[in-house]
Image (cartoon, helix red, strand yellow):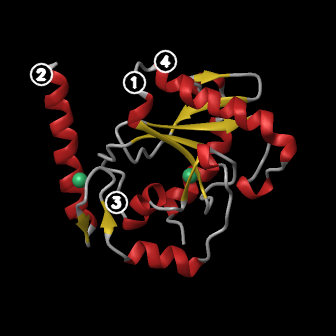
Amino acid sequence: MTNSVGNEWAAALITEIKDPKNYIISSENAVVIYDKYPKARHHYLVLPKAVIPDVFHLNLGHLSLLEEMHFLAQNVIEVKSFQLDDFKIGFHAQPSMQRLHLHVISKDFVSDCLKKKRHWVNFNTEIFLQYQDACIKRFTKEKIEELTASTLQCNQCEFGAKKLPDLKRHLLEHWAQRQSDKFLF
Ligand SMILES: [Zn+2]
Ligand SMILES: [Zn+2]
């Protein structure tokens, strides 16, 4: 089950992508906007202008569109003067919105919008289909529940948490450490 906020955003997204003033950057066939409920410090969505519901509706004819979307994903990181290595780029195997969207998200996962274990699992387990893996597979509801119920593994070290608040505290420590490292250089 998606939450109601997610559903509202899914609907709002359709109008959002019609208005060019919401675009951070765009190309002939795709646009980049801010994710309204960022699950990390920096979180963008790349969307095709054409109506494609989700990854399961992609076919070989979409290859050049996918390349264009991936190019925009890398480009928005560059435009914002961030490092490519600090980001993940990929799709969800369980689409949450009515439009195909490629996530561009910073790996810190420090965000007030990260409220559920499911949010973490969506981006940090095999549910997140990294663009470069280019392998689209479906997950069963049971598999997703299993992933959500198991230990939440930190994406930056060996730490594992049973509860989301513990993981969030831990992620904040990583982020604070990185900020102070940057400050030193
Ligand atoms: Zn998504
Ligand atoms: Zn860690």
Q: Kindly identify the amino acid type of the residue bearing the numbered disc 4.
A: Val
Residue 55 place in picture, x, y as percent: 71, 54
Front of the two marks 3 and 2: 2
Inter-mark Cα distance, 4 to 3: 29 Å
Q: Residues within 10 Å of mark 4 (few under 14, many from 20)?
A: few
Measured along the vertical axis of the image, is residue 130 above or below residue 146? above
- Location of residue 107 (image quadrant): top left
Measured along the vertical axis of the image, is residue 23 above or below residue 178? above
Q: Are marks 1 and 3 in contact (CB under 8 Å)?
A: no
* Label 4 or label 2, whichever comes before in sequence order: 4
Measured along the vertical axis of the image, is residue 86 above or below residue 6? above
Inter-mark Cα distance, 1 to 2: 18 Å
Q: Are marks 4 and 1 in contact (CB under 8 Å)?
A: no
- Which mark, by number, is residue 82? 1
Inter-mark Cα distance, 4 to 1: 8 Å
Nearer-the-camera pick, 7 or 136: 136
Q: Kindly identify the amino acid type of the residue bearing the numbered disc 3.
A: Lys
- Location of residue 151 (image quadrant): bottom left
Residue under label 3: 115
* Label 4 or label 3, whichever comes before in sequence order: 4
